[in-house]
Amino acid sequence: MSDSRKVALVVGASGIVGRAALAHFAAAQDWQVLAAARRPPADSANVRALSLDLLDAEDCRCRLAEHPEITHVFFTAHLKAASAAEEVGPNLEMLRNLVDALEAEVPGFQHINLMHGQKWYGNHLGTYRTPAKEDDSRHMPPNFYYDQQDFIVARQRGANWTWSSLRPQAPLVFSLGSPMNQLLVLAIYGSICKELGLPLHFPGSRGCYEALYQITDPQLLARSMEWVATQPQCANQAYNITNGDLFRWKNLWPRLAQFFGVEPGEVQTLSLERQMADKGPLWERIVHRHGLAEHPIDKLVDWRWGDFIFNSAYDNVSSTVKLRRSGFHDCRDSEECYLEALEQLRRERIIP
Ligand SMILES: NC(=O)c1ccc[n+]([C@@H]2O[C@H](COP(=O)([O-])OP(=O)(O)OC[C@H]3O[C@@H](n4cnc5c(N)ncnc54)[C@H](OP(=O)(O)O)[C@@H]3O)[C@@H](O)[C@H]2O)c1
């Protein structure tokens, strides 16, 4: 890799956000891409796989020393742990090892973009101030986002590189082994309802069914990653990024039911974790009968994430004014996004 194009290192390239970034930069004429993870996606046109373990400082240094051409880094790696407190250590260490290696081995390193999210505002804890703005007060820690941002702010002082961070909500992307995949929770749940001849009951709370919600289209997210990483006015800043509209599950639900070919059901609050625990064999039968890609259900879905999403019984709303004021004006219709993402899963033979 030795031409004048920018070189993106996407770290965590096999995950939800990483895949979105990879698809975007791989298709861009003016970028070359390195896709990094412990088990990175295979090489493809314009993308080279880079196997590295961010928790191994020496491995990071050695791997990055082989790629002094890197200019921009998109940090989408994430390790989920049993508690928020346990997430801090490894997620901070991954970032620190990466920055140590970049500073030591990559002379052309210009920018690192951190991928954070709406948990910055405590939307995983309960109600929060809405619309959430980037400089709202923090919630009671722990939250590894705070540790990562504090680290990068301190580390950047006096350095010749810059940082940015983005706070999306629920990018809809196919991925395997991701603990926080909202799209696949819905896709597998709906497919199983269809198989069992059930209406598409809303498995969460009435409050969630009626509250305002937001998502971030993956392509929009990837475009915003490129934007904040390359625009001088975005240097050393954090931004919310969502589709720019809002929706309510109760309005989207009949359209989702139609997609799965079932009736829209009632709000029937249940624990997906408990109720779906025995559905592995049923999913295997669906896969074989419809000739779907063979992925075990527990690699596709973590039902606990579904229980969290469908019981978020308060408005999830953030302001995107700061990003728009920086000059990024893209937006998407969220209901259409959902249906397009499901259609794509159908085309790719992930669901019937
Ligand atoms: N998912 C969402 O709905 C959502 C919403 C808003 C914000 N976010 C934020 O976006 C970020 C990424 O989340 P995600 O859901 O995309 O994560 P994910 O799907 O779980 O992917 C995590 C990625 O990190 C890599 N990784 C983990 N440990 C690693 C290590 N030691 N060395 C190198 N790579 C490692 C994984 O690959 P290997 O296991 O092969 O190493 C994988 O590629 C997180 O900060 C998350 O909070 C996510």
Image: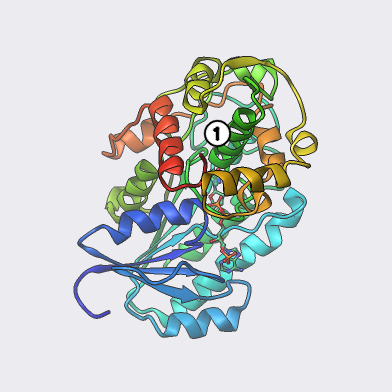
Residue occupying image coordinates x 28% and y 34%: 329
Front position in the image: 248 or 327: 248
Q: Farthest residue in the front direction?
A: 289
Few, some or many residues within 10 Å of mark 1 (<14, 14–19, 20+): few
Q: Residue at x 61, y 45 (%)?
A: 180
Q: Residue at x 58, y 84 (%)?
A: 58
Q: Quadrant of residue 295?
A: bottom right
Observer-nearest of 124 and 163: 124
Indicate the position of residue 54 as horizontal and vertical percent values. 58, 71
Describe the colour scheme in one phrase: rainbow
Q: Where is residue 9 in the image (x, y as percent from the top left)?
A: 40, 67
Q: Where is residue 307 in the image (x, y as percent from the top left)?
A: 70, 33
Q: Is residue 121 left or right of residue 161?
A: right
Q: In this view, does 269 lie above or below 275?
A: above
Q: Does the residue labelled 1 lie within 8 Å of ligand 1?
A: no
Give amino acid for label 1. Answer: Asp
Check disc 1 and report its element: helix, strand or loop: loop
Seen in the picture, residue 104 relative to 203 is either above or below; the reply is below
Q: In which quarter of the image is the N terminus?
A: bottom left
At 35% from the left edge and 55% from the top edge, which residue is drawn? 23
How many numbered marks are there? 1
- Percent coordinates x, y for residue 138 in the rendering: 62, 38
Q: Mark 1 points at which residue?
A: 136
Q: Foreground: 5 or 306?
A: 306
User: Hey, which quadrant is residue 312 in on the image?
Assistant: top right
The quarter holding residue 149 reads bottom right
Residue 291 visible, this orientation? yes
Horizontal arrangement in the rendering, residue 175 relative to residue 180 (left or right): left
Q: From where the camera sits, is residue 236 visible? A: no
Find ligand 1 in the image and state its quadrant: bottom right
Horizontal relation, residue 28 to residue 288: left or right? left
